[in-house]
């Protein structure tokens, strides 16, 4: 497995957990500390820290140091890379659906023309 695939696996595995998705959603509004991220959860701060570590390993979030605060930040470039990966497959499917629509439209037009000829 190449590095890109391993990175994708780590990112999607990290996003598979609902708590981590909620953390990502919160961070989309701006940086937050572990304490701030832990507030809405009924789990320990240590558990939230472990979730953040998984997100860090997947490169979905980063941490910085601001005096004694260590805010967690969303890594928008990583999310954009995941979106681009998903998007390439979406474009393929959309093209397939457009082709199918064209075939069905042709079929409908042909059948409609045949039915018109059969009418007295």
Image (spheres, rainbow, N blue to C red):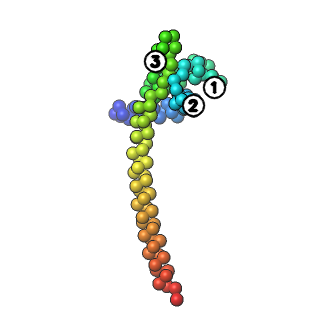
Pointer 3 or 2: first along the chain: 2
What residue would you read off at disc 3?
64
Looking at the image, which is closer to me, 28 or 78? Answer: 28
Q: Are marks 1 and 3 in contact (CB under 8 Å)?
A: no
Residue shown at 46% from the left, 78% from the top: 113
Badge 3 density bin: few <14, some 14–19, many ≥20, Cα 10 Å: few
Residue positioned 63% across, 25% down in the render: 41
Q: Earlier in the sequence, mark 1 or mark 2?
A: 2
**How far is disc 1 from disc 2 in space, using C-alphas?**
10 Å
CB of mark 1 within 8 Å of CB of mark 2? yes
- Secondary structure of the residue carrying numbered label 1: loop
What distance separates the C-alpha of mark 3 from that of mark 2? 20 Å
* In front of the other: 75 or 90: 75
Q: Position of residue 15 (x, y in %)?
A: 51, 33
Residue for point 48% across, 27% down: 74
Residue 43 x, y percent position in the rendering: 63, 22
| Residue marked by disc 1 | 40
Counting other residues with Cα less than 10 Å from the Cα at mark 2, is it few (<14), some (14-19), or many (20 or more)?
some
Nearest to the observer: residue 51 or residue 78: 78
From the viewer's perspective, is 34 left or right of 92?
A: right
Mark 2: secondary structure: helix
Image vertical order of residue 15 relative to residue 117, above or below: above
Q: Quadrant of residue 109?
A: bottom left
Seen from this angle, which residue lies furthest left?
2
Q: Position of residue 94 (x, y in %)?
A: 43, 53
Kindly tell me whether residue 92 is visible in this rendering: yes
Measured as percent of width and height from the top left, residue 89 is found at 41, 47
Separation (CA) of disc 1 from disc 3:
22 Å
Number of the front mark, 1 or 3: 3
Q: Which residue is mark 2?
A: 22
Q: Which is more N-terminal, label 3 or label 1?
A: 1
């Amino acid at each position: 497995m190449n590095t890109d695939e391993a990175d994708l696996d780590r990112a999607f595995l990290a996003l598979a957990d609902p708590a981590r998705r909620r953390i990502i959603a919160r961070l989309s509004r701006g940086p937050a500390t572990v304490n701030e991220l832990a507030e809405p959860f009924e789990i320990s701060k240590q558990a939230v820290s472990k979730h953040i570590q998984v997100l860090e390993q997947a490169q979905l979030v980063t941490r910085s140091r601001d005096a004694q605060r260590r805010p967690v930040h969303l890594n928008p470039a990583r999310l954009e890379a995941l979106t681009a990966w998903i998007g390439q497959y979406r474009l393929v499917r959309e093209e397939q659906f457009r082709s199918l629509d064209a075939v069905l439209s042709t079929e409908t037009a042909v059948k409609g023309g045949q039915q018109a000829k059969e009418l007295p």
